[in-house]
Amino acid sequence: MRLRPAYIRSHWGWVQEGLREVKALRGGSWRPEDIYAECVNKDAFLWVSDDTFVILKPTVDEYSGERILLTWMAWGKSKDDLMQKYQGQIVEIAKDQGFEKLQFYRHAKCFVEHKGWTKTYTIYEMEL
C-alpha cells in the first residue's frame, strides 16, 4: 500500500482510535488531541494508506541546523513492523522535501535497573 498525504479532520475517527492504542502501549504526557492540533497547525503531517497512518514531524537539529524528518507516530490495523514496511516511502518523502536525516523512536517497555532510570524509547537516525 502506498502512503498518501491526508487531512487529519477527514480521518480523525480511526486515527484517534489508533493514537489511543499507541498511547496505551507507549505512555507519555501527550493526548491524541495534541497530535491532532500539531497536524491542523501544520507542525506535523498525516500520511495514510488503507489501514495505516504515519505522522511525520519536521524538526531541526539545534546545533548543526540539519533538517530532520521524525516519524513521530505510526499505527496500523495489521501489527506488521511499520517502519520496515514503509521505510522506502518515508525515505522518498524525506528526500523529496529536502530533509538531511530521518529519525524514529522505537518504544521499549523495559527497565534499566540502575539508579532509578527507565528506558522509554530509543532514537534511530538515518543519513539521507
Image (cartoon, rainbow, N blue to C red):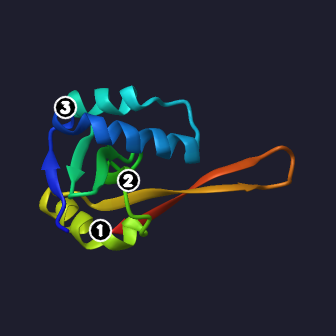
Estimate the spatial distance between the alpha carbons at disc 2 and disc 3, rounded to whole Å.
Answer: 17 Å
Q: Earlier in the sequence, mark 2 or mark 3?
A: 3
Q: Tell me if mark 1 has few (under 14), some (14-19) or many (20+) residues whose alpha carbon lies within 10 angstroms of its own.
A: some
The type of residue carrying mark 3 is: Arg
Q: Residue 97 appears at what percent x and percent y? A: 14, 56
Point out the image quarter for the N terminus. bottom left
Query: CB of mark 2 within 8 Å of CB of mark 3?
Result: no
Q: Earlier in the sequence, mark 2 or mark 1?
A: 2
Give the structural element (helix, strand or loop) at label 1: helix
Tell me if 30 is positioned left or right of 12 in this view. right
46 or 97: nearer the viewer: 46
Would you name the residue on which mark 2 appears?
74
Q: Residue 14 appears at what percent x and percent y? A: 30, 41
The type of residue carrying mark 2 is: Ala
Q: Which mark is residue 86?
A: 1
78 or 99: nearer the viewer: 78
Query: In the image, is residue 89 above or below residue 74?
Result: below
